[in-house]
Structure formats: structure tokens, C-alpha cells
Image (cartoon, rainbow, N blue to C red):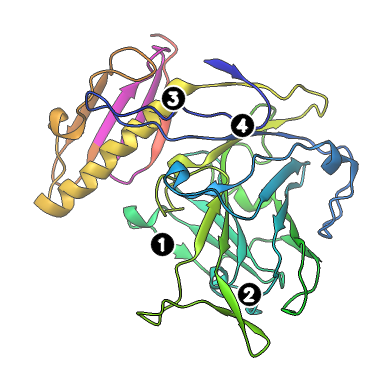
Amino acid sequence: MRKLFPTLFFLLLITSCQGQNNLIEGRAYISKKATDKIIVDGNANEKSWRNASWTANFVDIEGDKKPKPYFDTQVKMTWDDTYFYFYAEMEEPHVWAKLTERDAVIFYDNDFEIFIDPDGDTHYYTEFEMNAFNTVWDLLLTRPYRDGGHAIDQFDIPGLQSAVQIDGTLNDPSDKDKGWSVEVAIPWASFKETTRVSSPPKNNDIWRVNFSRVQWETEVIDGEYVKKKNKDTGKNLPENNWVWSPQRAIAMHEPEFWGEVIFKENPDSKDDFYADFGSEEVRQVLYDIHRKQIQNKRTHGTYSAEKDSLLSQESFQVGRKIEWLIQADQYRYHVIMQHPFDAGIYWHIDETGRLWKEIRTNE
């Protein structure tokens, strides 16, 4: 494990060779416990917010495959015994919104989105979206759509607080705005029935989190903002998807690529932590196997137990031989893979796509 410093780390993007999988860049953030009461008003004036670090600027959802976003987006996070707090600032010369009904498909507007998977198993995670009207869409995902997951739209986060501040004027094309900011408080109690970890978290706990900003290309017609259209098809131009931790593809619902948030109870603690690069690579290798198993099931009606067809590389890019076991039949599969550096850590994945870590103390 390596010691890394403030707010982010990178898994090296290594050129594929000898059949090895590329590691996807990951980001991390240290969230310090609040020292004063947070008032959710969209301003972030409290001392706790002033002491909180900014994340790195958002990047395109596909990472280095696409150009950097043309507007800046950054986030801060803090927490107390009741809430997990988020504050985001978005550069935007033309702030607009149309949707006003809760649980509408908010990303049809420019929006800000939060994704939270407390135990990092990719199952039962929270999605939250809001626009510049402070119209929200909160839902619970049972698992990713690729694994037959369902979005529970009826889920409303109990005790949710959110606010928007606009540096400019909303829905007024006649002037130029500076941007908009959002502040969100999500109660820890909303996670307790869907996670295996402590909520609120304990010192040094790590949760999987990501953020997305959807940005549409617009023009002004008859004094209103209208989405630009493809001249050949007449359809809206595709939206931009800007994120904190890149996803490799236009696919937010691949939680294995979300960033890590490390919780610190001592607000004076140093901004560093030890990143487990070995586990990060194991997770990504296991999900590459999982994608192949999904395809096997679709094509052949069964899961495969043939190692060579599921994984071509023999060693990790961070070092050492890959040690793994597999069981598979028509209905299910189960893979166990050992950590490259810690012989007592084993990672598991099965046909549901759920990922979990096992620690064997007698190894």
C-alpha cells in the first residue's frame, strides 16, 4: 500500500500489453468531520466548509478519451453525526432549468448528481439529482442495470435537505451568469437498511462515491434556452457528462469505478491516507471477468469455468501472479481472487455482480 496526499489519487493508466487490462484512473477525497452547525442554504459559509478541501476539477466521463470539460466543477464534502454534506460549485454563463416536479428525469435539464455506495459492493446504492430550480430526483438502485437491477423511484430520502444559489439570473438569456452552487445534506439514517457498514461511518471508513454533471448544448430562440439539435436528424445533440472519478465509458452505473471518500473524525488530521492499489486492481480484474460472464450467459446460456477465456493476463500490473479460483454452471458462478500483496485478503464476485472482501486471519 502507498501513502497518498490531498484529495485524490490516480491508478496509473498503463498501456495494455501481454493481454493485461488497463487500470482506470480513480480518485479519492478525505472528508473531515464538521466542527460547527451546517445550515443548508447553498452558500457554504460555515467554518467547516472553509476548512474542507476542494476535489479536483471534473473530467469527461470517459476520462482521457475525450477533451476536458469547458466549464469547471468542484465539490467539497463534510459530515457530522446526522448528515453527509455536499457542496458543489459549477461555472455556467447561462443558468437555466425547466423541470419543477419531484422525481422527474432531472438530467433532461442541466443537473448535478450524487451516487453513493457505502459498502462498495455495487448493490443497493443511492442516486440523487437536482437542477437549478432545486427540483430533486432521489432513487435507490438495487444493483446496476447490467445485472438486472431496478430503480426504485418511490424511494424518497427521509430528512433530505438541499439548496441552490445562482450567481446570476435563472432562465434569463439576456445576461451572462457566473454559475450556480448546490448544497445537499443526506441523513446517515437513510443508508442503514441497505448497507453492511456503519452509518454514520467510523474514523478511516471508506465509502464509494461519485458525482456527475450533465450539461446540454443550448441556443436562444424567442428569448428562451432551447437544446441544440442535430441538423441532419432533428434530435437533440447528446449531452456532456462530466464526473469526479472517470468511468471509462458513458456509464455512471458501474460503481466499481467510483471514487473513494475517507472519513476522518479529527478535523485537524493530515490530508493523507494509504491507498490499497492491490485491491483496486483486483476489483477491476474481477469486474472484467464479470462482464465476460454476462456475455457468456447471453450467448451460450451458461456461465464459463474456463479461466483462459475469462482472463488472459497471468500477473497483476502492480506485481505478482494472479491467484484465483472459479466455480460455474448454467445458473451461477463464483470467483475468488487473492490480494497481490496481502495473503490474508480475498475478493469475491458472483453472478449477481456483488463484490465483497474476505479477511482470513489464519493465512
Q: Could you say which disc has been placed on residue 279 in the image?
A: 3
User: Which label is found at residue 87?
Assistant: none
Range drawn in magenta: 334-353
**Mark closest to the chain's N terminus, 3 or 2:** 2
Mark 3, secondary structure of its residue: helix
Q: Nearer the viewer, residue 263 or 22?
A: 22
First reached walking from the N terminus: tag 4 or tag 3: 4
Whether residue 229 sits left or right of residue 322 in the image: it is right
Disc ID at residue 102: 2
Three-letter amino acid code at the position of disc 2: Arg
Mark-to-mark CA distance, 3 and 2: 39 Å
Residues at marks 4 and 3, CA–CA distance in whole angstroms:
17 Å
- Left or right of residue 272: residue 1: left
Give amino acid for label 1. His
Q: Earlier in the sequence, mark 1 or mark 3?
A: 1
Closer to the camera in the image, 177 or 246: 177
Q: Secondary structure at mark 4?
A: loop
183 over 336 or under it: above or below: below
- List the residue tagged with mark 4: 8
Using a 10 Å C-alpha cutoff, classify the residue at mark 1 as few (fewer than 14 neighbours), some (14 to 19) or many (20 or more): some
Q: Residue 309 appears at what percent x and percent y?
A: 14, 34
Image check: 358 left or right of 31? left
Residue wearing tag 1: 150
Give the number of the mark in front: 4 or 3. 4
Rendering quarter of residue 208: top right
Instruction: Give the amino acid type for the residue marked by disc 4 in the picture.
Output: Leu
Query: Is residue 135 covered in magenta?
Result: no
